[in-house]
Amino acid sequence: MSNLNSNVIPSHAKVSDPGIDGFRKSFRDMKTATTGVCMTRPLGGMGHVVESVSQILRQLKWGSAAEQALKNLNFSMDAYQANQVLKQIQDPAVALGFFYWLKKQAGFKHDGHTYTTMVGILGRARQFGSINRLLDQMVKDECQPNVVTYNRLIHSYGRANYLNEAMNVFNQMQEIGCEPDRVTYCTLIDIHAKAGFLDVAMDLYQRMQAVGLSPDTFTYSVIINCLGKAGHLPAADRLFCEMVDHGCVPNLVTYNIMIALQAKARNYDSALKLYRDMQNAGFEPDKVTYSIVMEVLGHCGYLDEAEAIFGEMKRKNWVPDEPVYGLLVDLWGKAGNIEKAWRWYQAMLQAGLRPNVPTYNSLLSAFLRVHRLPDAYNLLQSMLDLGLNPSLQTYTLLLSYCTEARSPYDMGICSQLMAVTGHPAHMFLLSMPSAGPDGRNVRDHVDKFLDMMHSEDRESKRGLVDAVVDFLHKSGLKEEAGSVWEVAAEKNVYPDAVREKSSCYWLINLHVMSDGTAVTALSRTLAWFRQQILVSGISPSRIDIVTGWGRRSRVTGSSLVRQAVQDLLSIFSFPFFTENGNSGCFVGCGEPLNRWLLQSYVERMHLL
């Protein structure tokens, strides 16, 4: 794990505190003892107790009023019933208050189930300090934790993107004799792959097989999804075939994953073929399948056919939810048909559904694309009136538009919109310091902000960093743009941007970036190669610079990214060539590359 970046986590949330040591010791002491889990009777005629208690806890915040209401019920409850109540509580503060209140009641004793449920509730709320205190109490109550308890804890850390802490729990559970199961491994594989650490995910997959846990349909589905989302679609395809060859039958979830991966890779024909294969295998499409196929048809330009799928979905008695309506808003908005997008938005409201933030983002993007700023402003206000908080993607959309604004007036209106969001990213940008002699002040500023945004998903962070670097670069703040890129690269925001394909053979992948970010990233990466040569004397034998297609163009070889990169390389006489007719990949190699990298101007290319 030494190659992983250190995850930032508050001191009170660390799992390696004395409480865990006691947790570990107690578990060893109890290995030969009984499980300590109470044998309880089913609800039976006592179901009304669970419902009455749950109703009070749904209506009241935890406090003296809630305690008095419970006391007035004059009920008795065992651990089984307490667990049923805890599972119905949404508010972690209420759940924790009720949990400790029960503990003080005469004759009541929590068991491993109630403790495990409570760990899950606190984990969803990311209250890791409270979890540690709960685990200490679990030890004192002589409740033996099991693999489910640990899995809940690992899942909680994974959701919060605290990967090192999740691995600590994984290692600790083995030290005290609790063997991980398939769920443990699948959870760890999933969270590492989503965070961009595919090598760790695949290592865990191999370790799972090594301990005799053969993959089942669920496991295969998780690994296939991980590989695909990490950009390794051929490997995902091979694993899907291996799954079938080993007699493991794909289920509806597996097909949905494969169709979605092919759709994301724009392999629309393959996605539709899988859809037909799924139906031939006897599976009826569900809401997820219909949504994916509608998206595929929309991206192919068949928006009327996508609407027909919506009709079929309703005929099959699947009630369309907000994401389905939101998808049609998004598809018509991207097609430039604002009126249709608006009609689907209105249809969603008429169906009694409340739009979520992604739907508002889709409509906001559509308004910005056709420069309808007053409509964008009104939409943002209505979003705030509903009590919805603009997301990182909302702010990214506005910042990208501001960068490309046609006039000072448009830029001014867009700046107002960015301020209205109230997103922390706006204060981060406004308080960006001017670059000092070594850029450390800017890097510290960026470092703190990305730590604050730690729990945001990687794609959202990447989108924002791309927009920030692009904005700074095109605003003339190129030193600051370079520093932002360097910190983001260190924090693995762009995990596949720079990698060594083989010994001294490097790949610089720029195709997912805007043109300003691509130029900045390329300049700082080439400067890094120069620094490595001066320190170690080892030169790269070959560098491939992949531009592919840019964010604003889907045509390989003719994007803004490719043109900007080619212009930069030409100005500085980079000894590049293209091979095999791939005009979207610039190649430098051998002695000409080494001589060029030693030129002093390579250090300052990003300032041009």
Image (tube, rainbow, N blue to C red):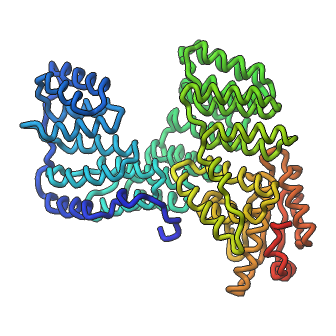
Q: Is residue 502 left or right of residue 62?
A: right
Residue 264 x %, y % = 67, 41
Quadrant, the C terminus: bottom right
Whether residue 18 can be seen here:
yes
**Residue 328: quarter of image:** top right
Identify the residue shown where x is 71% and y is 41%: 397
Query: Along the line of sight, which residue is nearer the eye, 568 or 377?
Result: 377
Q: Is residue 138 left or right of residue 196?
A: left
**Residue 94: quarter of image:** top left
Residue 438 x %, y % = 69, 74
Identify the residue shown where x is 55% and y is 51%: 453
Above or below, 537 relative to 295: below
Whether residue 262 can be seen here:
no
Residue 550 x %, y % = 80, 49
Q: Is residue 160 left or right of residue 149?
A: right
Q: Is residue 9 left or right of residue 372?
A: left
Query: Along the line of sight, which residue is nearer the eye, 190 or 130?
Result: 130
Query: Along the line of sight, which residue is nearer the eye, 400 or 79?
Result: 400
Residue 582 x %, y % = 86, 57
Above or below, 437 relative to 122: below
Above or below, 69 relative to 456: above
Query: Along the line of sight, which residue is nearer the eye, 388 or 432?
Result: 432
Identify the residue shown where x is 88% and y is 67%: 569
Identify the residue shown where x is 90% and y is 71%: 572
Query: Outermost residue toward the left?
Result: 107
